[in-house]
Amino acid sequence: MQRLRGDAAGAAGRFARGLALAEEELGPEHPQLVQFLVNLGEVQLELRELEAAEATIGRGLAISTGGAGGAGRGVYRPQLLLAAAQVAELRGDMAGAGALARQARALLRDRALPADVRSYRGAVLDLVARAAFAAGDATAALDAYSELLAVPEGHLSREAARLLIAYRNAAGLAVTREQPALALRFVAAAVPLLGEPGLAEAAGEALRVDLAAREGEALLALGRPAAAVLVAERALERWDPQGRREDASTADLHLLCFEALKQRAPTQALPHARAALRYFANEASLREITEILETWLRRYPGPSR
């Protein structure tokens, strides 16, 4: 309960106390310790206590791979592997993170595992995909995300936060790899999860606008600019009704509208170009986009103001 309420430090203390009591009663290698180690390691990871998390998770993995030890010894191994992969990612070792996540992916295909363990598939497949993409293998990345579409765990309402992040990343990758129809499938899988009550309002709105941008990009790639503009403008009305935001998500939506309108309706494209430029002009790494916008605005200054 403390963890669910956001008190990770308090939860860590409780899990550590429970672990100590269980160890005193059952011994240091008993398989029932694994569940305590999983919980404690995950909370330590949330607290970014990487050394402690690594030790806790490592101990859990060692027990879960031991010999005969009773039911449940390996049940939580996929969670432990995911946590170990997340530690590796935070340390900058994406290759190691990917290897651990792929082990978890294979284990999670076992339908005999408890549903709460299989529910980690979204986070696992997202990490598998991101590691594959970091290694230059976009095909393997899309394969991992596509697997998520085909399994029940890809639609679990209680895992809305994890799944929304995975589907947002998947849609962006599909657009980048020129597979807009697949991107729309990822968006369609994500949208029903946006209304889940357990999703934090701010996080849900941020994901909603990111998904709208990916949907609009896919529609534009499919030759449907009017539909793309409609999606983007609706998202802007909800996300930035006063027209004051200057963040990356808002800029992406304005850039999308600009791309869709610059040829067929330049007057309508003009305010979107100016709004996007307000953000991109301050981002040195996005100089190429800035130059495109500035060049177009010089050629089409629009009506005098």
Image (cartoon, helix red, strand yellow):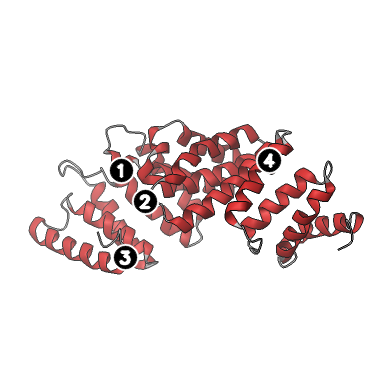
Q: Amino acid at mark 2?
A: Gly
Judged from the image, the secondary structure of the residue bearing numbered disc 2 is loop
- Report the residue marked by disc 1: 117
Q: Nearer the viewer, mark 2 or mark 3?
A: 2
**Residue 273, image x, y percentages:** 78, 56
Residue at the location (63% across, 52% down)?
236
Q: Mark 3 — residue?
A: 8
N-terminal-most mark, 2 or 3: 3
Q: Nearer the viewer, residue 47 or 27?
A: 47
Depicted 40 relative to depicted 219: above or below:
below
Q: Secondary structure at mark 1?
A: helix
Q: Which mark is residue 228?
A: 4
Disc 3 versus disc 1: distance between alpha carbons? Answer: 20 Å
Query: Amino acid type of disc 3?
Result: Ala
Q: Which kind of residue does numbered mark 1 sit on?
A: Val
Image coords of residue 212 (percent x, y): 60, 45
Q: Give the mark, 3 or 1, whose residue is nearer the N terminus.
A: 3
Residue denoted by label 2:
198
- Lower position in the chain sequence, tag 2 or tag 1: 1
Q: Distance between the Cα atoms at labels 2 and 3? A: 17 Å
